[in-house]
Image: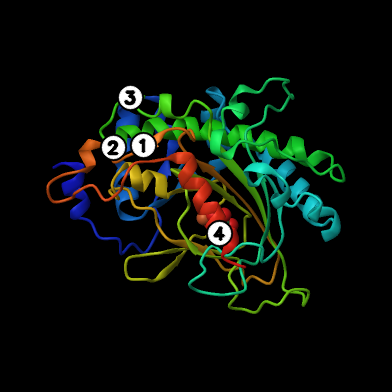
Amino acid sequence: MSLADSAAAVDGAFTSIPIIDLSKRTTPEGRIALAQEIRDACMKVGFFYSAHSDHNAFHLIQFILAVKNHGIPPECLNKVLAAMKEYFALDSETKLKLHHNNYSGFKGYSPPLDANIDPTNNTKGDFHEGFRVGWEEIKAKDNDEKRANDGAMAGANVWPSECPRFREACLEYYHEAVGIGKVLYPLFALALNLPETFFDDKTKNSAAIMRALHYPLQDGQFDVDDDTPGIGAHTDFKCFTILWQQPGITALQVRNSENRWIDAVPIDGTLVINIGDQLALWTNDVFKSTIHRAMNKSGQERYSIPMFFGTDYHVNIEPIPSCVSEDRLSKYSPITAGEYVNQRLKNMYQGTQ
Ligand SMILES: O=C(O)CCC(=O)C(=O)O
Ligand SMILES: [Fe+2]
């Protein structure tokens, strides 16, 4: 059965989110099995957790991936969480100095209610604040080709001098997550019956954007109520997202085909991986980009870190042939990844105005 045919046979009425054991990727058979699991998960759900199946998963992921230099050590997560707490606790005047409107490529700070990712559903905006970071070497380089090649999203990162440890903590996390992205791209290619290397020449510049997110408490400072989403219903703009969510606080929800919201409860030691629109474009919707949102009703502040992985900004995205058939005609016209992301970001920020 072709990918286009099997996509027609699945429905999206999932009630739980599968956990994929990334440790299997070390053998060729393991990678094929994993690609099959990823394929099933993407076609039905669009969201999955990346984990080792052991309850002590993080250490095992770290061990297995550390061999290939792809693990995210717990210290790295602790460090970035501590830095995020310190940064977001700064007063808003200080944070607003780095408002993303003042910089290119949307880098920098976005205050609460700045964006409205789902303008159809509310007028107040999304009740989170965030900080956007793109590619940068940890040890600053005079000539950073990867950053210079970022085309439509080009622009240097900006950093708050008031929280000196923020830069290093974010960039350490950024590079760890890029390592996991490098593991996932070949698995997605295999899952699509493509050569493992299909995405290699399309992801040379790591078109990866990280956002440090803070969902504040409703303390009367902002005009929000219980129905104001932390982030409204949306699909992500790129190929896939690797999301770290703060343990112990459930806020992320995924919508199934029956329009029911399914909680993506944080599971210790896992990262949530979800498919974004660029992969849906590449695959003519064989891989679904699933609608999700975050509603923080925990009564506590919440922190999360999505990292969005796209193809390089100059790359033209068009449905791959195995995902197109007579019954499943190509739904999308070619567009460059950069144009696509830039347009979506503009819409997101204009939605509140
Ligand atoms: O914070 C979360 O759990 C989700 C964030 C998200 O969906 C996004 O930033 O696109
Ligand atoms: Fe998202």
Q: Determine which of the numbered discs, if any, sits on residue 348 in the image.
A: 4
Up the image or down, 137 lies above or below 47; here it is above
Residue at horizontal 32%, vertical 70%? Answer: 258
Q: Secondary structure under badge 1?
A: helix
Name the element at disc 3. Answer: helix
Distance between mark 3 and mark 4 Cα atoms:
41 Å
Give the residue drawn at x 62%, y 60%. Answer: 248
The answer to whether residue 266 of the structure is visible from this angle is: no
Mark 1: few/some/many CA within 10 Å (<14, 14-19, 20+): many
Q: Nearer the viewer, mark 1 or mark 3?
A: 1
Q: Which mark is residue 192?
A: 2
- Asked if the beta carbon under badge 1 is closer than 8 A to the nearest atom of ligand 2, the reply is no
Q: Position of residue 57 (x, y in %)?
A: 53, 42
Percent coordinates x, y for residue 270 in the rendering: 53, 47
Name the amino acid, label 1: Phe
Mark 4 and mark 2 lie on one chain; the one further toward the N terminus is 2
- Marks 1 and 2, Cα distance to the nearest angstrom? 6 Å
Taking the spot 55% from the left edge, 38% from the top edge, the residue there is: 152
Q: Residues within 10 Å of mark 3 (few under 14, many from 20)?
A: few
Q: Mark 4 vs mark 1: which is more N-terminal?
A: 1
Residue position for label 1:
188
Q: Position of residue 129 (x, y in %)?
A: 69, 59
Q: Secondary structure at mark 2?
A: loop
Q: Earlier in the sequence, mark 1 or mark 3?
A: 3
Question: Residue 28 bears which disc, if any?
Answer: 3
